């Protein structure tokens, strides 16, 4: 299929736009940007040509990101689509089983992560069992990290408590969809033309090379990045203990002597390394990589919201104004971080920020003047 790469993202976008439209305006306007496959169920569609029809043609999407990059939105684009088998951070279990033996090192974690991704992308969900304690019996999982974040695990046949078109609610699923029958889940996975996963536990795209070169797989990577200053600000709010010293700096304006720079610089080093690999356009990434900035994404999100409101509401409100407000939220960190902290981040992160199009704030005034964005317009074309 000509459009297969774009179709993953665009179909997902279109589907969410349609859902928003249906919910908010009850109109049937469609936002299809790319020729859509016929809307038949994947089962009856298996003989058709539009979709990858068996595991060698199934398309796998890996959303590669780090915490506080706004991956929830892209994740939901994938999760909401009926043809996608989506798993939210399956590598959590690898980390949990390896961290107590951390001396074994990052290589082991990476090797194990790749193994698990490989199996899961082939719809072999039993592979998860090696990382679960106590080991599940009869392929029934008593618990799985954020299983309820996967819509497909929260509806029949995986979860008989909910019909396929019931409204998916994470907290309901949490209560009613355990234990999880991995046999059924694997079967459902095999019927879907797309398998998608999100992870924050693979640092750089280069780590995925063996998977991308494997002819048995057909992986596309979406790397999601964000202004590191925004990530820091958001992590200070979210992970108070882990980022305690940064929080003290933010609150008091004084940099604690014991502050660990690495916690922050790793974000930038990984971005730089990963994006540099991609920009050098190695053959193994051809047709398989797309870079997305959170800030650009939040403009899309704002646009969808602004354009899918009921008409009267849309008329009452300046919808482009709304879009601008919401996109500006992506830069709200500028009002939270003191200037010397921002300056420090900029010096640690120079290379990555330049590469990704994030401008330095040169003064406290410039930092706080929200009229001028610090995000440069920059187009990162998918490497086709
Ligand atoms: C999968 O599809 C390919 C291409 O259509 C075909 O050559 C292959 O035999 C199929 N494999 C299975 C297991 O059906
Ligand atoms: C839900 O799906 C069933 C068939 O699976 C169908 O009969 C029913 O009308 C659907 N309900 C809604 C509200 O779409
Ligand atoms: C899990 O589901 C499969 C079929 O989907 C079924 O054969 C099996 O009995 C189920 N396992 C348990 C323990 O219920
Ligand atoms: C930002 O823009 C608003 C409205 O356009 C204007 O009133 C305000 O003075 C501007 N602020 C700065 C610091 O330029």
Image: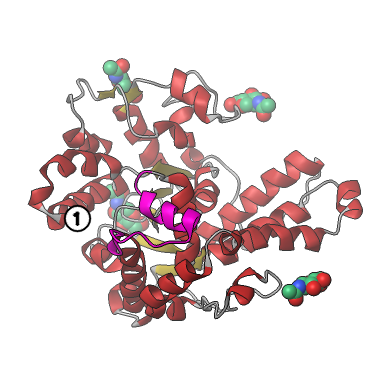
- Drawn side of residue 141 relative to residue 104, left or right: right
x, y percentage for residue 83? 50, 44
Q: Quadrant of the C terminus?
A: bottom left
x, y percentage for residue 160? 46, 19
The picture quadrant where one finds residue 128 is: top left
Coloration mode: secondary structure
Residue at position x 38%, y 20% from top?
A: 178
Range shown magenta = 241-262
Question: Label 1 crowding class (10 Å Cα cut-off): few <14, some 14-19, many 20+?
Answer: some
Q: Pick whichever, 246 or 332, lies toward us.
A: 246
x, y percentage for residue 248? 42, 53
Q: Is residue 243 magenta?
A: yes
Which residue is the site of mark 1?
110
Q: Is residue 226 visible?
A: no
Q: Pick whichever, 60 or 307, lies toward us.
A: 307
Q: Is residue 133 above or below residue 287?
A: above
Q: Is residue 360 above or below residue 321?
A: below
- Drawn side of residue 152 relative to residue 199, left or right: right
Ligand 4, image quadrant it occupies: bottom right
Residue at position x 22%, y 39% from top?
A: 96
x, y percentage for residue 65? 40, 58
User: Which residue sits furthest left?
Assistant: 104
């Amino acid at each position: 299929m000509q459009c297969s790469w774009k179709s993953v993202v665009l179909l997902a976008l279109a589907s969410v736009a349609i859902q928003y439209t249906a919910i908010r305006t009850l109109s049937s306007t469609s936002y299809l940007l790319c020729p859509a496959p016929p809307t038949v169920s994947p089962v009856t569609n298996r003989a058709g040509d539009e979709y990858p029809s068996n595991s060698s043609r199934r398309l796998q999407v890996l959303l590669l990101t780090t915490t506080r990059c706004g991956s929830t939105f892209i994740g939901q684009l994938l999760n909401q689509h009926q043809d996608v088998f989506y798993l939210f951070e399956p590598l959590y279990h690898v980390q949990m089983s390896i961290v107590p033996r951390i001396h074994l090192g990052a290589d082991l974690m990476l090797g194990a992560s790749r193994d698990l991704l490989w199996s899961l992308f082939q719809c072999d969900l039993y592979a998860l069992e090696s990382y679960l304690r106590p080991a599940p019996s009869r392929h029934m999982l008593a618990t799985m990290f954020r299983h309820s974040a996967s819509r497909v695990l929260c509806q029949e046949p995986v979860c008989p408590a909910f019909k396929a078109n019931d409204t998916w609610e994470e907290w309901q699923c949490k209560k009613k969809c355990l234990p999880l029958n991995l046999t059924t889940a694997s079967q459902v996975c095999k019927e879907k033309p797309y398998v998608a996963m999100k992870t924050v536990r693979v640092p750089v795209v280069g780590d995925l090379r063996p998977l991308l070169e494997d002819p048995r797989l057909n992986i596309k990577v979406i790397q999601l990045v964000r202004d590191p200053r925004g990530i820091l600000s958001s992590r200070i709010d979210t992970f108070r203990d882990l980022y305690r010293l940064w929080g003290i700096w933010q609150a008091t304006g004084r940099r604690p002597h014991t502050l660990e720079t690495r916690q922050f610089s790793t974000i930038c080093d990984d971005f730089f390394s990963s994006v540099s690999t991609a920009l050098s356009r190695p053959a193994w990434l051809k047709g398989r990589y797309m870079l997305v900035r959170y800030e650009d994404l939040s403009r899309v999100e704002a646009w969808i919201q602004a354009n899918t409101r009921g008409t009267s509401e849309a008329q009452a409100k300046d919808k482009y104004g709304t879009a601008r407000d919401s996109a500006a939220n992506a830069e709200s960190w500028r009002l939270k971080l003191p200037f010397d902290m921002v300056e420090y981040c900029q010096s640690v992160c120079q290379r990555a920020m330049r590469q990704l199009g994030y401008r330095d704030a040169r003064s406290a005034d410039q930092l706080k003047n929200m009229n001028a964005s610090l995000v440069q317009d920059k187009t990162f074309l998918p490497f086709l």
